[in-house]
Amino acid sequence: MSSLATDFTSFVRHKDGLAAIDLAVDGIQCAGCMTTIEKGLKSEPGLVSARVNLANKRVTIAWQDGRENPQGVISRLDEMGFKAYPFATEKVESAEAREERRLLRCVGVAAFAAMNVMLFSVSVWSGHETQMPAEMRDLFHWISALIALPTAAYAGRPFYESAMRALRAGAVNMDVPITLGVVLALAMSVFETMNSGEHAYFDGVVMLLFFLLIGRYLDQAMRRRTRDTAGHLAALRSETAVKFIGEHELSEVPISAVAAGDLVLVRPGQRVSVDGVVEAGRSEIDQSLVTGETRHQPVDVGSSVYAGTLNITGALRIRVARASEGTLLDEVETLLARATESRSAYVQLADRAARLYAPVVHVIAAATFLGWMLFGLAWQQALVIAITVLIITCPCALGLAIPAVQVVAAGALFRRGVLLGSGDALERLAAVDSVVFDKTGTLTLPAASIANAASIDPRDLQLAGRLALSSTHPLATVLAKAAKAADPLDGVKERPGLGLDAVHDGEQLRLGSAGHCGGDAGADASIKAMTDTLSEQHPDASFITFRRGDHIVVFAISQALRPDAAEAMAALGGLGLDLSILSGDRPAPVAKAAAALGIRLATADLKPAGKIAAIEALRSEGRRVLMVGDGINDAPALAAANVSMSPASAAHLTQNAADAVFLGDRLGPVVEAIRIARRARRIMVENLWLAVIYNAIAVPIAIAGHATPLVAALAMSGSSIIVTLNALRARA
Amino acid sequence: MDVLIVLMPLALGMGLLGLLAFLWSLRNRQFEDLDGAAWRGIADDD
């Protein structure tokens, strides 16, 4: 790393003569770290305050404007053992955080109203027994109305807005019956109060809003937590660009240190972080995020590329036209957008329940009205009973049943180092019955050196390393590091899952699998001879073949199983899952890993298309497949499976195609994820049944015309509390 | 029952005070880090 000074100006906020910056900090684990950091920074001169946020692992520091440079604080944190990175909160803390605060405000208002209306309602209910005078009851109802009407107008807006959006789009969502119920209940209660009636539902309405808002808030809080973590990881890992600081020297620098006119290198599989013009190289660019065009765009020298696009096949040197300031924001928003998209595609449990629910409730209410009319009741009275049915059935418990479980389960997974990329990943994980693993980088971790380095010509190593710089494959990364290569070759083409091609000094260069470098009989024979000898010397190793013209070199890179791989496999087998390995590596190391892990089904020598075919074959047998693999190199296979997980170290979080990523060197989180997902799914279904049982009891009472505001209040709060308590069990 | 004239505004006023306190603490970002707040309570300050 170079010692380039980072420019912090874009991260610093100024207010009242104070400057403040948010730092994303790696390594904050517990309350101990919190006090260590705060005490350690207290002695720092010039600082006005330093406060750790333990929930999202950030430190906010403030200092007298112009007196201090955040660099000092970052170095101080570094000395204490915490890596800190500037974080642009203002940009990221956008609509989501505002929405969360708005919901919390609504919850507070509804809670206040519910408590105070209840004060009067309880008086009325008890007064019913002790013959409270009618005038007194009416007064209490009017005061309740005075509290409930403004509350409903304010705290109910999240539901009204959502219902209006749905109706305008010609659809019905859960918020439509909620809105209808609230409005009708309020209208009826005001009417009752004006006519000195007994049944005012002001308490029921505000309580309903209170419980539903809690569910809405939990939902929002879970998404914000994912967002926070994603943003944090983005700041920690990848807000860097690979910049040329000399003719042939590369340096990884923070994105803020890239300026217009700089030359940067973008490898295949990396997202372009700047707007610029291609100076050298040829590739295809995925612009789907920027333009929505899914076909890859070929680019060549002189083509323009834009921040946010994904470089697919070849390494590019790009002359920066405009350094992207909002890159972090872009990335986080991409992740969010994907999470939201999958939320809308997530028609799973919650929405299926809602789709069933809305028409059934409205039909029952209408039938009740018509039924009582036929029985000869006056239409006003029949209407009152029908509205009562609507109020009683308002989906209080239903609105809490699933978000509450999701929040609890996502929190439990988070503590175990698993981050969910999409909301429905939990449900899809729960349904899994087969797990397919990639080997390299997933079951095994490559060692950081080349096993047969002594027997390789340094010039070959150097050239292969420079070629390998253009790939993000775990073996290529090791090779590039071992060769200490810093100067990538021009015009490198990557054939995903196979290898790299380039032409250098008139010679054809290839790096990758044996098949990629072979092709003619002579080459195939010499590759085979070399790998056979090497297999005897290094039985654990994976091989990467390099071909320069007709000259062939094979690099052996040792592989070690992840520390807890065997236990994790045993645990997965214990959960009744079928395990298999699909690897692009040679049969010998694959068979060895499979034997060590007790996995019977292992296929080696697979190309990406072969992996997809194998997964699709499993799926056509009716299997529900979890694919665990590297987020970039296995992206197509990950997408082919029902649900996918990927180690976070392998790739950038937002570039990751997986539904969930896990942190650390252990495979245990995969087991935990499936276990928790299954439990969560079971609890969600239980909760839905609890809601059904509640309705089965309460609705007949309402149809019979015996529902009073007291019955409604008890039933609604009772069912909501039971559902929430049940959700807490998902923690285990 | 005349006491109600005093009691009702008193009860509502106290509730309203609670609500205002909540909104104030929300505005002061006191709900941003509930995990940290839980630990700060038992951390020994010297």
Image (spheres, helix red, strand yellow):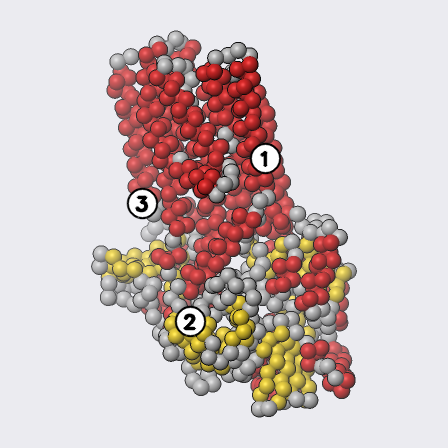
**Relative to A25, is A449 above or below?**
below
Q: State which quadrant residue A235 falls in.
A: bottom left
Type of amino acid under label 2: Asp
Type of amino acid under label 3: Arg
User: Which residue sits at x=73%, y=70%?
Assistant: A605
Residue with the mark numbered 2: A275
Type of amino acid under label 1: Leu
Give the chain letter at badge 2.
Answer: A
Q: Position of residue A39 (x, y in %)?
A: 35, 58
User: Which residue sits at x=31%, y=45%?
Assistant: B27
The reply to whether residue A22 is visible in this rendering is yes
Image quarter where the N terminus of chain A lies is bottom left
Image quarter where the C terminus of chain A lies is top right
Question: Would you call the spot at circle 3 few (<14 residues within 10 Å), some (14-19), or many (20 or more)?
Answer: few
Mark 2–mark 3 Cα distance, whole angstroms, equals: 39 Å
Foreground pick, A287 / A314:
A287
Q: Position of residue A114 (x, y in %)?
A: 39, 29
Residue with the mark numbered 1: A356
Q: State which quadrant residue A620 falls in.
A: bottom right
